[in-house]
């Protein structure tokens, strides 16, 4: 017989030393791995780098209204394009305006992104995928992110105006009774409908008045 070494698995029937055999710290039996004490599992599935920030509801809504476009030649900033011949954000906005109102355009290298005022414009633009227009082989797909830097000045103005309209509180009308305090601006009271009896009485009164005037003037004809 020989001395049992530390960590040696004894043959079957071997009695472990008194006090029991302690497995190495943090080691789990087969069938699962026990993480060391204090170890935090990665969040969000990105190698322990922490969870990514959750996109806001506005980002999600804008992403649904945005498409990614590739296959357009001569975008602004592309090499070998003469000044004045490059395709700008305004050109792209005009081209895709047939699909819906364009509020944002971004160009980055050979790619561009188009943001529409509503999702129906983006859906219409997706129908252009795989088509050819003016020598451009369009590849249109749904965007994964909203536009962060909008190079389309008109679109920025529309977005700013929409944001200002949404932030401004609706203007309240004049207090009740304010219009009545100014007779010049007070609305006229609706006229009351006369009953048939009142109408006949008014006609008879007018006829009597006319007869009296004709008799006084000597023009009464009987």
Image (cartoon, rainbow, N blue to C red):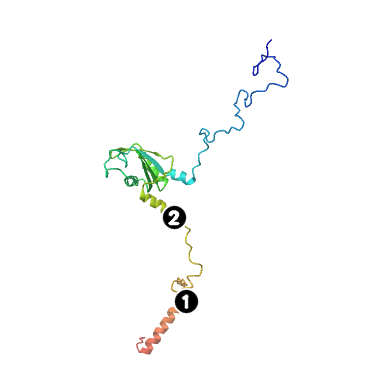
| Residue highlighted by disc 2 | 164
Give the x, y percent position of residue 199.
45, 76
Q: Residues within 10 Å of mark 1 (few under 14, many from 20)?
A: few
Q: Earlier in the sequence, mark 1 or mark 2?
A: 2
Determine the residue positioned at 39% across, 84% down. Answer: 210
| Residue highlighted by disc 1 | 198
Give the image quarter of residue 216: bottom left
Alpha carbons under labels 1 and 2: distance apart: 57 Å
Q: Is residue 86 left or right of residue 203?
A: left
Q: Nearer the viewer, mark 1 or mark 2?
A: 2
> Nearest the camera: 71 or 215?
71
Determine the residue positioned at 45% across, 77% down. Answer: 200
Label tally: 2
From the viewer's perspective, is residue 188 above or below residue 4? Answer: below
- Label 2 element class: helix
Give the x, y percent position of residue 61.
46, 45
Give the image quarter of residue 85: top left
> Nearest the camera: 125 or 87?
87
């Amino acid at each position: 017989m020989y001395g049992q070494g530390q960590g040696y698995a004894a043959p079957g029937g071997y009695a472990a030393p008194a006090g029991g055999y302690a497995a190495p710290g943090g080691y789990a039996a087969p069938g699962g791995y026990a993480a060391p004490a204090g170890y935090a599992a990665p969040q969000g599935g990105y190698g322990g780098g922490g969870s990514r920030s959750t996109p806001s509801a506005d980002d999600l809504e804008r992403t649904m209204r945005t498409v990614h476009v590739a296959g357009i030649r001569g975008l602004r900033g592309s090499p070998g394009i003469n000044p004045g011949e490059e395709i700008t954000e305004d050109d792209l906005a005009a081209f895709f305006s047939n699909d819906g109102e364009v509020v944002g355009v971004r160009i980055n290298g050979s790619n561009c992104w188009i943001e529409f005022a509503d999702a129906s414009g983006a859906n219409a633009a997706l129908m252009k995928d795989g088509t050819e227009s003016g020598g451009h082989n369009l590849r249109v797909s749904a965007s994964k992110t909203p536009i962060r830097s909008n190079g389309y000045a008109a679109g920025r103005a529309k977005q700013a105006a929409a944001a200002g309209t949404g932030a401004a509180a609706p203007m309240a009308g004049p207090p009740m009774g304010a219009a009545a305090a100014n007779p010049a601006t007070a609305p006229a009271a609706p006229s009351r409908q006369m009953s048939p009896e009142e109408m006949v009485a008014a006609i008879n009164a007018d006829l009597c008045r006319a007869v009296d005037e004709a008799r006084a003037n000597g023009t009464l004809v009987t």
